[in-house]
Image (tube, rainbow, N blue to C red):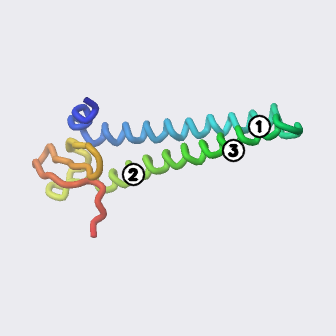
């Protein structure tokens, strides 16, 4: 169902969804950062015994989550920007006036103006 929806989207709309998704990862990363700071501030690590070890384990888990969430943000954001930099039709020169067919990698595009088809996001070598 989602692939059919994505097939009918224009590139600008697809790019917008990619950016919204990436910034959702960034927002999650920031919320985990606030949670990390709140635990350090309110609970602290000055206790002894099992409570201190449990606090450190929770903080370690949140730290790993922060790193993973930021990595996902950066991967999706840089992918969307890389695709946007190669989103010009080679035949007629129009930017973003095409439909995107997304399954996995690669992303196929068809220009609405001249009906030219190409692959978005491949390095031009």
Q: Secondary structure at mark 1?
A: helix
Separation of residues labelled 2 and 3 (CA atoms) = 29 Å
Quadrant in which the N terminus appears: top left
The answer to whether the residue labelled 1 contacts the one labelled 3, judged by CB atoms less than 8 Å apart, is: no
Instruction: Name the outermost residue toward the bottom.
Output: 125
Vertical arrangement, residue 106 with respect to residue 19, above or below: below
- Tell me which numbered mark, 1 or 3, is placed earlier along the sequence: 1
Left or right of 48, for residue 58: left
Q: Which residue is mark 2?
A: 79
The answer to whether the residue labelled 2 contacts the one labelled 3, judged by CB atoms less than 8 Å apart, is: no
Vertical arrangement, residue 59 with respect to residue 95, above or below: above
Separation of residues labelled 2 and 1 (CA atoms) = 36 Å
Q: Residue at x 70, y 38 (%)?
A: 58
Q: Please give the label number shown on residue 60.
A: 3
Instruction: Name the outermost residue toward the top.
Output: 1
Left or right of 58, for residue 28: left
The answer to whether the residue labelled 2 contacts the one labelled 1, judged by CB atoms less than 8 Å apart, is: no
Left or right of 79, for residue 89: left
Q: Residue at x 63, y 37 (%)?
A: 32
Left or right of 28, for residue 13: left
Instruction: Name the outermost residue toward the left.
Output: 115
Could you tell me residue 15's position as x and y percent?
34, 42
Q: Secondary structure at mark 3?
A: helix
Separation of residues labelled 1 and 3 (CA atoms) = 9 Å
Q: Secondary structure at mark 2?
A: helix
Q: Which residue is mark 1?
A: 55
């Amino acid at each position: 169902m989602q692939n059919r929806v994505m097939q009918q989207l224009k590139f600008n709309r697809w790019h917008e969804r990619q950016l919204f998704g990436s910034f959702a990862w960034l927002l999650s990363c920031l919320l985990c950062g606030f949670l990390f700071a709140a635990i350090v501030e309110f609970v602290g690590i000055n206790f002894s015994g099992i409570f201190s070890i449990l606090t450190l384990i929770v903080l370690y888990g949140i730290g790993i989550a922060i790193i993973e969430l930021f990595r996902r943000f950066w991967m999706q954001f840089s992918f969307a920007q890389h695709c946007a930099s190669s989103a010009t039709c080679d035949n007629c020169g129009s930017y973003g006036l095409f439909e995107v067919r997304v399954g996995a990698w690669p992303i196929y595009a068809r220009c609405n103006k001249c009906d030219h088809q190409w692959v978005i996001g491949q390095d031009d070598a």
